[in-house]
Image (tube, rainbow, N blue to C red):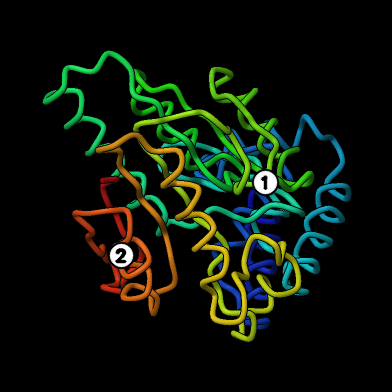
Amino acid sequence: MELTFKEFLRGGKEQLAAAGFAEVEAEHLLAHTLGLTRMDLHNPLTVENALAAIGDMSVVEETFWKLLDRRCAHEPLQYLTGVAYFRHLEIKVGPGVLVPRPESELLVESVLTHIDRMNKEKMMSAVSVVDLGAGSGALALAVATEAPNTHVIAVEQSAQAIYWLKENVSFIDEKVRIVESDVAIALEGVKCDVVIANPPYIPDGQELPVDVREHEPAIALFGGADGMKVPRLFIAAAARLLKPGGFLALEHHENQGIEIAAVLGVEFEDIALHHDLTGRPRFTTAVRR
């Protein structure tokens, strides 16, 4: 059984490699098929028990090969397994919601650092945070779970994304408040300490990988002809929502740093451009005047 299983997994890796995908994705797909973690695949006893519980290897084979075929057709791996890993969280995702990217983890880190500074310098017992365009809720839930003294509101307009947002909030942290609204009019009369946002910022004509272009929601990706239309709307909303001295962290295209800073300069100060781990400009922080 163990030898057959290893050969079976090897066949999946070879199929993915031939299609130009990372072999390790076969492990993720097989683990999902068996209801295990990827690391569990390296424990023969755990695998044997999982196969015994299913009882029919042909069911495992059929399910696994179908998933492999769908991945080779460029369906996102996270849609197939239903999970995207973000910081310490397992975020449920599927069609209709953007898959959270590792690059956004640095954005969260910057916000958490600022919240910690606020706690120490201003002795704040609670910090109010608004996540604009929350999507799956990855940013909002990371902040809420890693900074327990925060009150987090997740704003999202897309009905498809709202489904996944509600799933994640109910599973991870029910204290996060969900507001289904257009960012431009959301939370009228509300003021907060922090705004975090990853708006659609890709220029409409930019080429994207097939996985992204054909499967992830365009409404969460494209920000207008030059990619700046939607970020401008998000900056205006942040300026309306933030208290004087409030903190904004905004993700954007690597080529938009100068223009983002110019837009922020009207109502914000202490504007700083931050780079991701590959050295590319990734997000900007600023303080509301």
Residue 196: where, in percent of width, then height? Answer: 42, 45
In-image side of 206 versus 55 (left or right):
left
Which of the 4 image quarters holds residue 194? Answer: top left
Residue 84: where, in percent of width, then height? Answer: 57, 48
Disc ID at residue 276: 2
What residue is at 54 percent from the left and 38 percent from the top? 90
Q: Is residue 69 above or below residue 142?
A: below
Q: How many residues crowd mark 2 within 10 Å: few (<14), some (14–19), many (20+)?
A: some
Disc count in the image?
2
Q: Amino acid at mark 1?
A: Asp
Judged from the image, the secondary structure of the residue bearing numbered disc 1 is loop
**Depth check: 63 or 188 in front?**
188
Q: Amino acid at mark 2?
A: Asp
Residue 228: where, in percent of width, then height? Answer: 51, 72
Q: How many residues crowd mark 1 within 10 Å: few (<14), some (14–19), many (20+)?
A: some
**Depth check: 179 or 26 in front?**
179
Question: Which of the marked residues, 2 or 1, is nearer the chain's N terminus?
Answer: 1
Judged from the image, the secondary structure of the residue bearing numbered disc 2 is loop
Cα distance between the residues tagged 2 and 1: 29 Å
Which of the 4 image quarters holds residue 277? Answer: bottom left
What residue is at 31 percent from the left and 71 percent from the top? 281
**Depth check: 124 or 232 in front?**
232
Q: Are marks 2 and 1 in contact (CB under 8 Å)?
A: no
Q: Is residue 167 above or below residue 5?
A: above
Q: Is residue 104 above or below residue 35?
A: below
In-image side of 160 versus 189 (left or right):
right
Q: Which residue is mark 1?
A: 182
